[in-house]
Image (cartoon, helix red, strand yellow):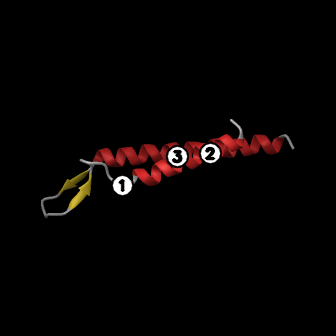
Amino acid sequence: MGSSAAERELSVLRRKLEVGREPLPGERLGTAKGGSRLSPEYESRIADLERQVASAEDRLKHAYEARNALR
């Protein structure tokens, strides 16, 4: 994957993470004291998005390294 493709992928995934931080219906749970908390499903979904972003950052780093090695 070239650096420009890796940059685009990272940009898309960062945006998905940003938008994904908003809880989906059913991901906010009520507490006994009248408050709310986020569900384990929300935490899992966000962790997955964060892993995807980290992986894309890694791919971009390697793409830059490969590009720079050719110079």
Location of residue 52 in the rendering, given as x and y in whole percent from the top left corner: 51, 42
Q: CA separation, marks 2 and 3?
A: 9 Å
As rendered, which of 46 and 20 lies closer to the eye?
20
Label 2: which secondary element: helix
Contact check, label 1 and label 2, Cβ < 8 Å: no
Which residue shows up at 73% across the image and 45% down it?
64
Q: For the residue marked with disc 3, what is the amino acid?
A: Leu
Sooner in the amino-acid sequence: mark 1 or mark 3:
3
Q: Quadrant of residue 71?
A: top right
- Neighbour tally class for label 3: few under 14, some 14-19, many 20 plus, Cα within 10 Å: many
Which residue shows up at 21% across the image and 59% down it?
36
Q: For the residue marked with disc 2, what is the amino acid?
A: Arg
Which residue shows up at 29% across the image and 47% down it?
40
Q: Which residue is mark 2?
A: 8
| Count of numbered circles in the view | 3
Q: Which mark is residue 58?
A: none
Sooner in the amino-acid sequence: mark 1 or mark 2:
2
Location of residue 48 in the rendering, given as x and y in whole percent from the top left corner: 43, 43
- Neighbour tally class for label 2: few under 14, some 14-19, many 20 plus, Cα within 10 Å: few
Q: For the residue marked with disc 1, what is the amino acid?
A: Glu
Quadrant where the image shows the N terminus: top right
- Neighbour tally class for label 1: few under 14, some 14-19, many 20 plus, Cα within 10 Å: few
Label 3: which secondary element: helix
Judge from the rendering whether residue 19 lies leftward or rightward of residue 55; answer left or right: left
Label 1: which secondary element: loop
Q: Quadrant of residue 3?
A: top right
Q: CA separation, marks 1 and 3?
A: 15 Å
Q: Which residue is mark 1?
A: 22
Location of residue 16 in the rendering, given as x and y in whole percent from the top left corner: 47, 48
Sooner in the amino-acid sequence: mark 2 or mark 3:
2
Judge from the rendering whether residue 30 lies leftward or rightward of residue 51; answer left or right: left
Q: Which mark is residue 13?
A: 3
